[in-house]
Image: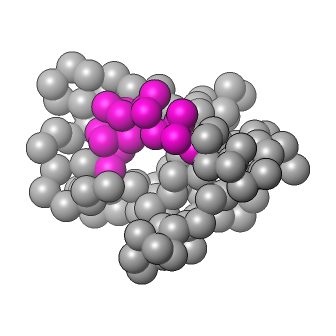
């Protein structure tokens, strides 16, 4: 996932805690709605991504996770705080855009990883 050199910037970011979603609208008119689970399991944090592709972890048991808060990080990213106390991921604009553009592919790969490793979305 590329996290530097944003091509598009958000014009609106809205967290819906009741539905557990984050909706991001970009300056080119594209709008992506993400579930909290999708964002949590794809956190760009070192805890999830590691320091190399070989260190990446498959996060499981997060079906019910929700967003507690979304904080601006400079003018290039947001930090999302989840109710499982994970808050170390910095989601750059480019990361959010990539997660949106490739949402189906990334989600299907995640589901396959869970199956291959005998893991579940549930706790």
Q: Picture coordinates of residue 76 (x, y %)?
A: 24, 56
State the count of labels: 0
Q: Picture coordinates of residue 15 (x, y %)?
A: 54, 35
> Does residue 72 appear to the left or right of 42 in the view shown?
left
Residue lying at the far front in this picture: please name it. Answer: 116
**Scheme of image coloration:** one colour
Q: Which residues are magenta?
A: 95-110
Q: Residue 9 occupies which quadrant of the picture?
A: top left
Residue lying at the far right in this picture: please name it. Answer: 123
Residue 4 visible from this viewpoint: yes
Q: Tell me what residue is drawn at x 17 percent, y 29 percent.
A: 27
Q: Tell me what residue is drawn at x 66 percent, y 33 percent.
A: 20
Looking at the picture, does residue 89 appear above or below residue 119?
A: below
* Depth order, front residue of 62/20: 62
> Does residue 121 appear to the left or right of 9 in the view shown?
right
Give the main secondary structure, helix, strand or loop, of the magenta stretch: helix
Q: Tell me what residue is drawn at x 66 percent, y 58 percent.
A: 59
**Residue 119 covered by magenta stretch:** no
Q: Picture coordinates of residue 69 (x, y %)?
A: 58, 50
* Depth order, front residue of 69/103: 103
Q: Residue 78 occupies which quadrant of the picture?
A: bottom left
Residue 65 visible from this viewpoint: no
> Does residue 31 appear to the left or right of 94 in the view shown?
right
Residue lying at the far bottom in this picture: please name it. Answer: 51
Looking at the picture, does residue 18 appear above or below residue 88?
A: above
Q: Tell me what residue is drawn at x 46 percent, y 28 percent.
A: 104
Q: Picture coordinates of residue 7 (x, y %)?
A: 12, 44
The N terminus, quarter of image: bottom left
């Amino acid at each position: 996932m590329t996290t530097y050199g944003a091509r598009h910037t958000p014009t609106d970011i809205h967290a819906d805690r009741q539905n557990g979603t984050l909706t991001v609208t970009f300056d080119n008119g594209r709008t992506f709605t993400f579930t909290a689970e999708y964002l949590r399991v794809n956190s760009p944090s070192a805890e999830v991504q590691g320091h190399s592709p070989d260190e990446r972890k498959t996060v499981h048991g997060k079906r019910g996770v929700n967003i507690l808060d979304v904080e601006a990080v400079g003018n290039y990213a947001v930090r999302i705080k989840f109710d499982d106390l994970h808050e170390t991921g910095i989601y750059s604009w480019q990361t959010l855009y990539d997660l949106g553009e490739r949402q189906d592919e990334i989600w299907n790969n995640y589901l396959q990883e869970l199956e291959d490793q005998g893991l579940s979305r549930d706790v």
